[in-house]
Image (tube, rainbow, N blue to C red):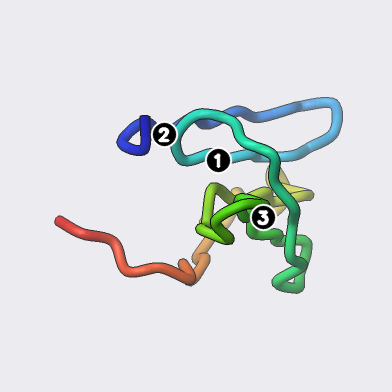
Amino acid sequence: MKNKLFVHYDEDGDLLEIRIGEPTESYYNDLGNDVFERRDEKTDELSGLAIFNFKKRAENGIDVELPVKLLA
């Protein structure tokens, strides 16, 4: 289901994971600054984001430019 958004925070690893749709075989691209985009291995579509060191960053808010256009 593509319209489902999964958000998980791992406090021990200080990792925020955001996944779009059901889990698929994926790979990660390093976008820099501890931010990674998750892409589906078969379709190459964006399927999520992973942000390391999230707690420290979240104190002042986080701006992440999405590599996709979001529809209203």
Viewport quadrant of the C terminus: bottom left
Cα separation, mark 3 vs mark 1, equals 16 Å
Count residues near mark 2 (Cα–Cα under 10 Å), then give few for <14, some for 14-19, many for 20+: few
Q: Are marks 1 and 2 in contact (CB under 8 Å)?
A: yes
Residue wearing tag 2: 5
Q: Earlier in the sequence, mark 2 or mark 3?
A: 2
Residue nearest the viewer, comparing 14 with 27: 27
User: The residue under label 2 is which amino acid type?
Assistant: Leu
Question: In the figure, 23 relative to 38: above or below?
Answer: above
User: The residue under label 1 is which amino acid type?
Assistant: Ile
Residue wearing tag 1: 18
Viewport quadrant of the N terminus: top left
Cα separation, mark 1 vs mark 2, equals 7 Å
Q: Quadrant of residue 3?
A: top left
Q: Quadrant of residue 60?
A: bottom right
Question: In the figure, 46 relative to 32: above or below?
Answer: above
Q: Identify the residue shown where x is 60% and y is 28%.
A: 8
Disc number placed over residue 57 in the picture, else none: 3
Question: In the figure, 67 relative to 54: above or below?
Answer: below
Residue nearest the viewer, comparing 22 with 37: 22
